[in-house]
Amino acid sequence: MVLTNLSLFGQTTFTLNGTIRDAASNETLNGVNVIINELQTETVTNTYGFYSISIPEGNYTITLSYLGYNTINKYISITNKTTLNFSLTESSETLDTVVIKEDVERTNIRSPQMSVNSLSIKTIKQIPVVLGEPDIIKSILLLPGVTNAGEGASGFNVRGGAADQNLILLDEATIYNSSHLFGLFSIFNPDAIKDIKLYKGGIPSKYGGRVSSVLDIYQKDGNSKKFSAEGGLGILSSRLLVEGPIQKEKSSFLLAGRSSYAHLFLKLTDNENLAYFYDLNTKLSYKLDDKNTLLLSGYFGRDVFNLNDSFKNVYGNSILNLRWNHVFSDNVFTNLSVIYSDYYYGLELDLAEFKYNSGIRNGNIKYGFNHYINNDLKLNYGIQNTLYEFNPGKIEPSTTDSGINAFTLTKKYALESGIYLSAEHNLTEKLTAEYGLRYSAFFRLGQDRLFTYENNLPVIYNQEQGVYESADPVGEENFNRDDIIKSFGNLEPRVSLSYLLNDQSSIKLSYNRIAQYIHILSNTSSPTPLDVYTPSGKFVKPQIVDQVAAGYFKNFNENEYSLEFEAFYKYINNRIDYIDGTDLIANDAIEQVILNGKARAYGLEVLFRKNLGKFQGWLSYTLSKSEQKTPGRSEIEPGISNGNWYLTNYDKTHDISITTSYKLNDKWTFSGNFLLQTGQPTTFPTSQYQYEGQTIPVYGERNTDRLPLFNRLDIAAEFTPNPNSDKRWQSYWSFGIYNLYNRKNAASISFRENRTTGVNEAVRFSIFGIVPSISYNFKF
């Protein structure tokens, strides 16, 4: 493409731009290939469906290509700058690809972007999951480099990183807890979602704040042409989405809701326990004119638990985002977002007669630019500012005669800012680069009080007993809200390169540095709703990651098959570690129980896919290692686990998944997936002793043992009774069996003394056996 542009040097060029949408719903389409055939030059649409390309005066054939849609070839005449908007129609004959990376041939091979995966919503709905609810988070666990802490566990781990190192965005707003019912469901309603991308490495400079990955999810805008609805009725939960025009082809609305209702069956048996969730997705879109569009989107979700009125628990996310898309000129597209995000956790224990609530909220402003300099150079730049309020906990008595005194843990405040510039650059016909720089700044703002310690050490080492202990404060500092307690600044370079070996294969390299300033405080293997966030500051340093990756990518047999092979290495400074016996609940001085350590992860990932035909699917394999190290701060301190590298809770040496789907005919589609993983690291007691009639276990170094091998087979079938019906009401049935051969995978292993024999025994705790499911899905 560079040579093509050089041949056009001296000719008068004009800008061709526009927006590409779905013909049926008027939804903008991200990643559509726009190709000028005679010039052999191309571009792709951005997140909001906008494209811009420079071409000389003349007559051309333009091709619009997007997987799952009919290709358009249109004859155009360019005599000056031109705006052309297009609508693509879904192809009934073209089978939806299993994994979409915008365009298999062009983007997967030519683009420098690597370590990125996307899943179509259609594929997600076909993947068998527990209880039959389509699940975005469970689906990405089938991709290479992505795992979690086990069945029913919240969150996910990417390339050996912790769950709090993932940035999860819904319409650009930060999501702090991605799970319902402690990990059984994700918070994302698949009917309301338009676009999903998971960045595992080579992360673009517009993203910051998390060192492992970015899961970027966008909701649908709403159908501005006609009213429609879709949903599903399942065994334990149901969902419904309604969308339509407010003013035809100018404005639209979307409203989607989900709820579980297992607790209603409990009431039929006089069981007063409650355990359910509900969530609501909303979106309003208004096209002011050809250059301006306003979008208002929101999400609200809650989980509710009530055990005999003695234990009450409510938690969930809330977000609101107002966006303004503006086309400044033929080659400059901007997006301004004003965002509010909130995560709340509430707990009430009647036995202890107290209420507890905590959370984190932020206000965020983002202003980003897509600047199409020419066909070989595109710039992305912008600014971002986020103001945080951290509420570590407020405790109040729940009854008038409670012995609990009301108190509030000290709230924390912070400001995080970022400015970024990146370039997508075609350097030669074979070499393409994406490079950029982000500067992030973090300011820990004033709070009501901050403890001070002797020698500035909140954790001390007791040499006599050989243990780390919390230091006693020697005083405290008080600040005004606009004071700056501590500030940090980091340059975060990013670069990705792609070299085209031929039309079907390429090699890629990437490097990124990212700073993470907020942390989850959790000493469990997976995140829980009770986990508390804390900002970097005087005693907690920001995590800094350096990650490199290299890969080989190939499509063959006319793109029916594809192979991706990647190797990665990442090193993290200032990873939080915990002293033994740490208690994080209602702790107003968390600096007394944490130390700053290091972490590293490295491995190989293979993804082999069959993209076309009746039989589709992928084989994913990851070979990796994830370790952590916290050395002593002086010669007399041993550090954690004697200062040696030890396996993290999310290390999985081998991780294999096979995902398949087979379209038998227009009525029946069958699918299945198989998972095989190395057992999760854990720490078993090495010995025991008796003290005052009690058996006390003795533990060695951390995570030197493992749970048994994890494996599971799931199958599903989709039945469409009337696939060729002209009726507006369309429906299909989904049948599934989760854990077909009833494998009792260990979530944990505990040790106890058998009361009958008096012999110590290991007890395996499993969450799921075989789980059948059925759901009825509809659209009209």
Image: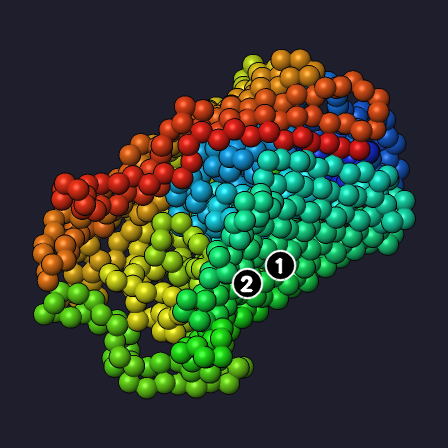
In the visual, does 173 lie left or right of 492? right
Name the one closer to the observer, 707 or 375. 707
Residue 764 point in image, percent of width and height: 29, 39
Residue 589 point in image, percent of width and height: 36, 73
Q: What element carries label 2?
A: strand
Task: Give the Cα distance between marks 1 and 2.
Answer: 8 Å
- Residue 675 seen in this snapshot: no
In the visual, does 610 lie left or right of 457? right
Q: Residue at x 63, y 23 (%)?
A: 718
Q: Are marks 1 and 2 in contact (CB under 8 Å)?
A: yes
Q: Which amino acid does label 2 sit on?
A: Tyr
Q: What element carries label 1?
A: strand
- Quadrant in which residue 49 is drawn: top right
Q: Dot 1, how many residues are within 10 Å of its Cα: few (below 14), some (14-19), or many (20+)?
A: many
Q: Residue at x 43, y 50 (%)?
A: 163
In the image, residue 476 above or below residue 628: below
Name the one closer to the observer, 509 or 603. 603
Name the one closer to the observer, 278 or 148. 278
Residue 318, which numbered label? 1
Q: Which residue is drawn at 90% across and 44% down?
A: 248
Residue 88, which numbered label? none
Q: Which amino acid does label 1 sit on?
A: Ser
**In which quadrant of the rendered image does the N terminus lie?**
top right
Q: Mark 2 points at which residue?
A: 344
Looking at the image, tell me whether mark 1 or mark 2 is earlier in sequence order.
1
Q: Which residue is drawn at 71% across and 42% down?
A: 240
